[in-house]
Amino acid sequence: MKSFLLYAAVSTLLLSSCQSSKASKKKETVANATEKVKTDSINTKPADNKTILARREVPVLCYHQIRNNIASDSKRAHDDIIAPDKFREHMKMLADNGYHSILPDQLYNYLVYGTKLPEKPIMITFDDTDEDQFTIGNSTLKKYGFKGVYFIMTVSIGRKGRINYMTKEQIKKLSDEGNTIASHTYDHKNFAQFTDADWTTQIDEPTKKLEQITGKKVEYFAFPYGVYKSSTLHKLKEHGFKASFILSTSRDENYPLYTIRRIIDPGRYTAKNLYYSINKSFNKTKA
């Protein structure tokens, strides 16, 4: 009987040891695979400017105010205003035509590392912090499963008046729901006219404020008026930005990541007009 008990104890010990060894090896295999993924990611060589420029451009739309025109609006302002009903029609058109919204990190990884994007990708962006971008824009995007990019002008946060602007709480909610919060300077100063001091007041301080609101890094920037200055584009990287967005002018061959093109969706466009404009503006290069 003692021999039997001893044999059973030894067998149990050996079985336990064997199972522990298998579990350990399995854990080691998983750890090695995870480490390999990390290593492969780290070792992926970023594309050069020529390769980035050769990739097919992804359509990027730009919106400002989502409201009806009023008598005091200038003729120029009409390009930046789209009626709520028309905006909804445009988003429905995108959904009906199979577009999938993407965010800046996805676009960056596609341009730099060739990461695959969903079929018919499109980016939907908003400038200047207008509250209607939250109340109408965000609610409409949600309806179609879209996400947006909100370029915030920090001087306007929480302001009320003829035009109301988003509050900190609304900006935080957008971020928490998976949208991207990005920078659009402090008070819309023309980037081409930046002084040395502006890199603190127009860039670093707005970045810090937005990061405090969202709890996330701010790594993308949109130029006020779409205007940039080639000689200072390199400083955007030095100040923590991975990419930046212009409007419909040509990209800078030396800084394609910092001159990503967008087109404004004017309020006078029908959904059909917008569809035509997207295809005309972003079909110039091959995948």
Image (cartoon, grey):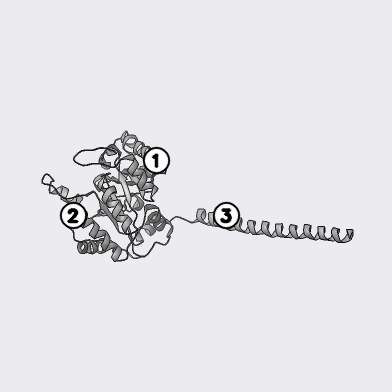
- Residue ID for mark 2: 267
The amino acid type found where label 1 is placed reads: Glu
Q: Nearer the viewer, mark 2 or mark 3?
A: 2
The amino acid type found where label 2 is placed reads: Gly
Q: Nearer the viewer, residue 171 or 208?
A: 171
Whole-number angstrom distance, CA of label 3 to CA of label 1:
30 Å
Q: Nearer the viewer, residue 246 or 69?
A: 69
Horizontally, residue 240 falls left or right of residue 18, namely left
Considering every residue shown, the one lying at the far left of the view is: 71
The amino acid type found where label 3 is placed reads: Glu
Q: Nearer the viewer, residue 75 or 20?
A: 20
Secondary element under disc 3, as helix, strand or loop, is: helix
Q: Nearer the viewer, mark 3 or mark 1?
A: 1
State the image coordinates of residue 32 (x, y, percent, origin top left): 60, 56
174 vs 25: above or below: above
Q: Is residue 12 visible?
A: yes
- Which numbered disc flags the more N-terminal residue, 3 or 1? 3
- Which numbered disc flags the more N-terminal residue, 2 or 1? 1
- Which numbered disc flags the more N-terminal residue, 2 or 3? 3
Residue 35 bears which disc, if any? 3
